[in-house]
Image (tube, helix red, strand yellow):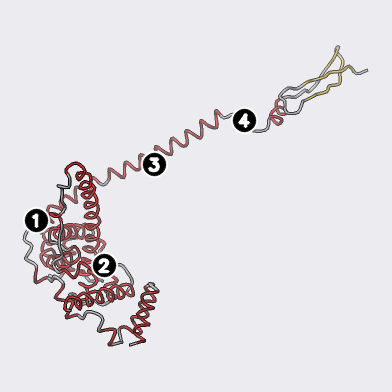
Amino acid sequence: MFRCKIINFFFIIFPLKIWQDFLLRHHIQKCMVCQNKMASLDETKPLLIQESEIEKLEVLWPAVRAGLSEGKRKERLFFRPRLGWAVGVVGFLVALIAGIWLYSIFTPDRRPSKEILIERFQINYIRVENKPARAYIFWPHDSKMIIVWAEKNI
Amino acid sequence: MNDKQLIRSCLQGDVEEYRKIVNKYNGRIMAIAINILGNREDAEDACQEAFIKAYNHLGKYDFKKNFNSWLYGIIYNQCLDKLRKRRRFYMFLNKIKRESFQFTKGRASTNSIHHPFPKRVLKNLSLKERAILFLWAVEGYTSEEIGSVLKCSASTARVHLFKARKKIKAILEKENV
């Protein structure tokens, strides 16, 4: 009796199905005291509505039959929401690709301005008074301005 | 013609053969639905929807398994669905009731939609417990079979069955005192 109470306590305190099932299989189902705390088959059966108590359902088949033909119609219509989804997904992808393409076209080059200037500004040859001259290029820090100083070779 | 032959005929498109299946199983299916839902109107709706669903999914039926159990699985899910809808409806109704109360001083009432259980004791059990109790007491299913119908493990089914039986015993003892 005391053992049953302890097992019942552990059954309640740890509501894990595996644990509860373990207690059920190893004690409760074998113990007469615990069995007496459960409703028996004879006590349970009269509480439930059984097939014999139910009036014959004459109207069920016509209703089911009508539902079956409706179901076929639904199957055919089932294509529509799927098509809608497909159109939606394709539309989204097209918009996404177009967006990326437009962004790549209209976005200014993000490379550091120094790199761009070096790439674009180039002096191959400089002459002063028809003679080759020295060239000095000044590029003030953090500026897009470039100063070219040309000097005669003395 | 046995069930499996009837199902094969249905799969070949013979809808009229399905009538035999419906007529054969409607009593059992209705019984479990009434026990779960607690009223005949909802149970009839659930039964009708379950048979339609079963027909539409006959192709998925595994011929190695018991057709009866397969149908019970469908009706159980249909009852769950029905209860969910009913709950939503009650919530909506309660909202209306609350709102109308402010204007009509509580004239609105939900008493007309209250469906008492045919057997009062079952009211104290959860939906799963009612279904398990039916399968155990009426159909004589084992925990493993109950688990396969309700898509849960045998141990879960055993625990639910134990709890349901314990609750019933407690209620019956209380009533007898």
From the viewer's side, name the closer residue of A113 and B112.
B112
Q: Name the residue under label 1.
A: A62
To the question of a shared chain for discs 2 and 3, the answer is no
Distance from Cα at disc 1 to Cα at disc 3: 41 Å
To the question of a shared chain for discs 4 and 3, the answer is yes
Q: Give the quarter of the figure containing the N terminus of chain A.
A: bottom left
Q: What element carries label 2?
A: helix
Circles 4 and 2, Cβ within 8 Å, touching? The answer is: no
Q: Which numbered disc, 2 or 3, marks the residue closer to the eye?
A: 2
Residue type at mark 3: give it: Val
Residue A137, given in percent of the width and then of the height, sits at: 80, 24
Task: Tell me which label, 4 or 3, sits earlier in the chain.
Answer: 3
Distance from Cα at disc 4 to Cα at disc 3: 31 Å
Residue A44, given in percent of the width and then of the height, sits at: 18, 76
Label 1 is found on which chain of the structure?
Answer: A
Q: Name the residue under label 4.
A: A109
Residue most extreme to the right: A154
Q: Mark 3 points at which residue?
A: A89
Q: Name the residue under label 2.
A: B128
Distance from Cα at disc 4 to Cα at disc 2: 65 Å
Residue B60 falls in which quadrant of the image? Answer: bottom left
Residue type at mark 1: give it: Pro
Q: Is mark 3 on a helix, strand or loop?
A: helix
Residue B144, given in percent of the width and then of the height, sits at: 29, 75
Distance from Cα at disc 4 to Cα at disc 1: 72 Å
Label 4 is found on which chain of the structure?
Answer: A
